Amino acid sequence: MKVLVFVKATPNSEKGMMPDEKMEQMFTDMGNFNEQLVKAGIMQEADGLKPSSAGKRVKFTDGGHATVIDGPFAETKELVAGYWIWNVKSMDEALEWAKRCPNPMPGDEGVLELRPTYSAEEFDQLLTDEHREQESRLRKEVTRQQKAKAKPAAKTKAKSKSKAAPARKKSAKRKSARAKSKK
């Protein structure tokens, strides 16, 4: 079961500010929590969001008209400051993990909102074969794109390691040559 976990915004997060003295500890605690989520195979993705002043909203009408509204947005308690995507067995498991989360808003009351996502199977009676095929094709394409993006990063890491390795070998050879010349 996929669950989207929202970290709700606060007036301070909307201002882009958090108490400095508490930030380092929050990053340490949250890093440890995220590490536990990853090791347990729960976390699929996570990120913090910039304040709504950096965002936009798009409102649609049935007539096809779209209106763009610039942030900031008024109701802080309705805004999101970050998110996780978790893969869990049940909502109870998601709740147990959420209860272990350190306060994501030091100095303020932190709030997490957990929302299970729909799966294509839950819409099965409403979907035509054409819709199912399209959904399948799009999921495969997204997976292919993610793999393609991951490959260059892996190649870059491999290249930087291979470039660094000869430098270490040279310095080891130099040390060995120096040691022999001193004898």
Image: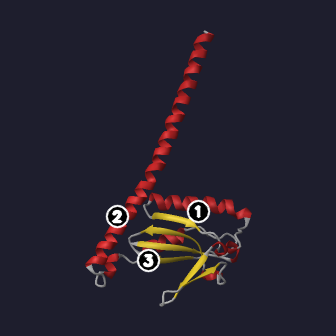
Dot 1: few (<14), some (14–19), or many (≥20) neighbours within 10 Å?
A: some
What is the quadrant of residue 168 in the picture? top right
Q: Residue at the spot x=52%, y=65% of the render? A: 46
Amino acid type, mark 2: Lys
Q: Earlier in the sequence, mark 3 or mark 1?
A: 1
Quadrant where the N terminus sits is: bottom left
Q: Are marks 2 and 3 in contact (CB under 8 Å)?
A: no
Amino acid type, mark 1: Met
Q: How many marks?
A: 3
Q: Residue at the spot x=33%, y=80% of the render? A: 122
3 or 1: mark nearer the eye: 3
| Relative image position of residue 171 (x, y in whole percent) | 58, 25
Amino acid type, mark 3: Pro
Q: Which residue is mark 1?
A: 30
The CA span between labels 2 and 1 is 32 Å
Q: Which residue is mark 2?
A: 140
Dot 3: few (<14), some (14–19), or many (≥20) neighbours within 10 Å?
A: some
| Relative image position of residue 103 (x, y in whole percent) | 61, 70
Quadrant where the C terminus sits is: top right
Q: Which residue is mark 3?
A: 116
The CA span between labels 3 and 1 is 22 Å
